[in-house]
Image: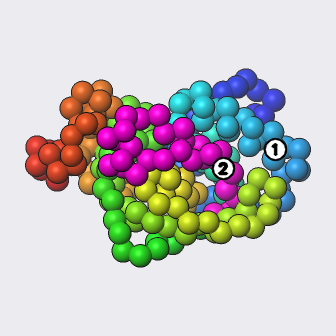
Amino acid sequence: MLAGPRPLRLVQAGDPVLRATATAYQGQLSSTVLADLIEAMRLTMHAAPGVGLAAPQVGIGLRLAVLEDAAEVDEETGRLRERSPLPFLVIINPEYEAVGVRRAAFFEGCLSVNGYQAVVDRAADVRLTALDGDLQPFQRDFSGWPARIVQHETDHLNGMLYLDRAEIRSLTTTDHYIDRWAHLPIETAARDLDF
Ligand code: ZN
């Protein structure tokens, strides 16, 4: 597959690979192949475009994801969502835990659930433990939108989609999201969609 075209094909919901618990990375790929996979995933995430991509989304059941968010949103949206730039990051065998009790509810989407968005209530602050792209262990705290990305991508490795955690009545097409909800408070969507 890594010899094939770029970007890689994105797996859509309904493929069992998205519902399986991904296997811990324990040297199954050579360092060269691992580096090729990470680069292919980075290109695929950029092309989509998206702010995170987990290996199962390209059909590979390993605990590996890439994250990057240029946070190119207007100032108000960025402030409300605490969306600050997240430089490119590789996470291997990641685990997260909530730090504190702060929560945040916002619409989010997924490259494997093409064309939809839904509100997900998540921990606003998390502590990530993982290996980096050089297989070095690290621990790092994330807040706001980067914390949401960390949770979303790590959940993929546990066979979860954001819809499993979503306020399901908030489900909206991306077109409706852009037209109606992107610039309104979540409370307005909650009232009008009754979730
Ligand atoms: Zn996703």
What residue lies at 26% left-to-right and 51% top-to-bottom?
168
Asked whether residue 159 is in view, the answer is no
Residue 192 in the image, given as x and y percentages of width and height: 11, 43
Q: Earlier in the sequence, mark 1 or mark 2?
A: 1
Q: Is mark 2 within 8 Å of ligand 1?
A: no
Q: On the picture, is 112 further left or further right than 194? A: right
Q: Disc 1 marks which amino acid?
A: Ala
Is 57 situated above or below 195?
A: above
Q: Nearer the viewer, mark 1 or mark 2?
A: 2
What residue lies at 34% left-to-right and 41% top-to-bottom?
77
Residue 11 in the image, given as x and y percentages of width and height: 56, 37
Secondary structure under badge 2? strand
Q: Which residues are magenta?
A: 66-94
What residue lies at 67% left-to-right and 56% top-to-bottom?
91
Q: Disc 2 marks which amino acid?
A: Leu
Q: CA distance from mark 1 to mark 2?
A: 13 Å
Q: On the picture, is 168 further left or further right than 33? A: left
**Is 45 covered by the magenta stretch?**
no
Sort mark 2 into few (<14), some (14-19) or many (20+) by Cα contacts within 10 Å.
Answer: some
Residue with the mark numbered 1: 35
Residue with the mark numbered 2: 89
Is 35 situated above or below 101?
A: above
Closer to the camera in the image, 91 or 27: 91
**Is 88 covered by the magenta stretch?**
yes
Residue 171 in the image, given as x and y percentages of width and height: 27, 43
Quadrant where the N terminus lies?
top right
What residue lies at 49% left-to-right and 67% top-to-bottom?
126
